[in-house]
Image (cartoon, helix red, strand yellow):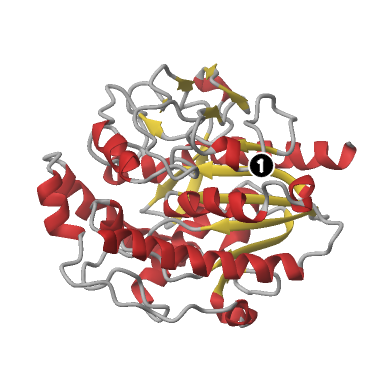
């Protein structure tokens, strides 16, 4: 298992190295040349929920063995009794080719990278009785780096898959079981829309323990009011939304803000330069600051031993005036090869705070059941 973890992590390195190579010049032209497909968008037939009745359409789900979401770092053990909650996790972009606007479901490399992301980012929720993470025809990374209408069509196709998978998830989960929603990057972008379409104003909203929308901005004006739940403002609050985007200092956030501005809010208007939600994963509150001592453990890959380990007390976190989550100077951990230009720790939004996210999730689930 440890060697497999190393292998998948190494495959994921390709994504980051390519991004670093192109973005180091902060050139939108170079980014478009490297990642945005040249061809037209190929319309594809929508897949109905019945497609996700096939266990092969899931990266994680009950009965799957091995299940990447159930992985734990050395020294971390799961409770014998799972938490009575179901988790729906949407993985981030793992398709970086410009040969197509959307990943094919039989793309082995994209699937391997997606399994990596589920292993690192869904594992904090692994104590849940059920964890579900669907495969979907994700938009290529270039779809988020262009104003071409093909980019939005690619994103819409990916979202239609996520929505169909979610409907199967809801049908399989017991009616009295609470739910946690989580997604990172493209997965977080889709999760915003899913909350508008399946949670806001519906009975399901009462079953949501929390929604972790990580690595994509949640506009306080154009998104949050339509997602059906308020921001998380206390560590034991339930029925709320948490979101953050991580940067070390000095932070260069221009390119992220440009990508953000390319997409409209859930109210179908331009988000502009408006404020977005910043939840501090070390405190579980909105707009807070915490010292490194509050960090229960950053997940760091160990390439020599072929495993990931937790390093507590290394990384602080502060929700700053620019609405990004700042972690101070780059931490003295073996993370550099995955850091994007401008001190952007996007790929580490979850793993920087792996142990705190695990504790936050378990605390909110316990609070939901207590109430």
Q: Position of residue 152 (x, y in %)?
A: 34, 59
Side (left or right) of 240 relative to 96: right
* Number of numbered callouts drawn: 1
Side (left or right) of 256 relative to 235: left
Q: Say few, some or many: other residues with alpha carbon within 10 Å of mark 1 (under 14 / 14 to 19 / 20 or more).
A: many
Residue name at image x 53 percent, y 48 percent: 192
Residue 242 in view, yes or no: no
Q: Position of residue 204 (x, y in %)?
A: 76, 53
Q: Does residue 214 sit above or below 295 in this rendering? A: below
Side (left or right) of 256 relative to 211: left
Task: Please tell me whether mark 1 sits on a helix, a strand or a loop.
Answer: loop
Which quarter of the figure is the C terminus placed in? top right
Residue name at image x 62 percent, y 80 percent: 55
Residue name at image x 63 percent, y 51 percent: 181
Q: Position of residue 146 (x, y in %)?
A: 23, 53
Residue name at image x 67 percent, y 56 percent: 87
Q: Position of residue 276 (x, y in %)?
A: 46, 30
* Residue with the mark numbered 1: 228
Looking at the picture, tell me which residue is in the foreground, 196 or 291.
196
Looking at the picture, tell me which residue is in the foreground, 110 or 232.
232
Q: Does residue 317 sit above or below 268 in this rendering? A: above
Residue 311 in view, yes or no: yes
């Amino acid at each position: 298992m440890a060697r497999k973890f190393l292998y998948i992590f190494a495959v994921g390195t390709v994504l980051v190295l390519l991004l670093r190579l192109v973005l180091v010049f902060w050139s939108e032209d170079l980014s478009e040349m490297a990642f945005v497909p040249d061809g037209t968008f190929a319309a594809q037939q929508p897949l109905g929920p019945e497609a996700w009745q096939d266990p092969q359409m899931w990266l994680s789900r009950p009965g799957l063995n091995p299940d990447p979401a159930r992985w734990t770092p050395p020294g971390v053990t799961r409770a014998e009794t799972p938490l009575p909650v179901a988790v729906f996790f949407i993985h981030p972009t793992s398709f970086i080719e410009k040969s197509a606007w959307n990943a094919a479901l039989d793309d082995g490399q994209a699937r391997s990278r997606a399994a990596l992301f589920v292993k690192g980012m869904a594992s904090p929720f692994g104590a849940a009785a059920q964890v579900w993470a669907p495969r979907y025809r994700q938009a290529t990374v270039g779809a988020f780096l262009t104003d071409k209408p093909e980019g939005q069509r690619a994103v819409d196709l990916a979202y239609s898959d996520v929505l169909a998978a979610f409907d199967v998830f809801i049908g399989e989960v017991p009616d009295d079981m609470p739910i946690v929603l989580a997604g990172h990057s493209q997965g977080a972008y889709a999760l915003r829309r899913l909350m508008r379409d399946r949670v806001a104003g519906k009975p399901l909203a009462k079953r949501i323990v929390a929604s972790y929308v990580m690595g994509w901005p949640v506009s306080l004006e154009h998104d949050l009011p339509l997602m059906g739940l308020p921001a998380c403002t206390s560590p034991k609050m339930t029925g709320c939304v948490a979101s953050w985007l991580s940067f070390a200092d000095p932070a260069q956030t221009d390119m992220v803000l440009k990508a953000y501005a390319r997409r409209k809010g859930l109210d179908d208007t331009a988000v502009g330069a408006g404020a977005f939600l910043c939840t501090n994963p070390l405190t579980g509150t909105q707009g807070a600051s915490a010292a490194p001592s509050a960090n229960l453990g950053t997940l760091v890959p160990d390439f020599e031993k072929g495993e990931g380990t937790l390093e507590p007390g290394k990384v602080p976190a502060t929700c700053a005036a620019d609405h990004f989550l700042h972690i101070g100077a780059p931490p003295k951990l073996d993370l550099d090869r995955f850091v994007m230009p401008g001190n952007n720790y996007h790929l580490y939004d979850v793993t920087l705070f792996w142990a705190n996210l695990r504790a936050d999730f378990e605390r909110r689930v316990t609070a939901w059941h207590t109430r």
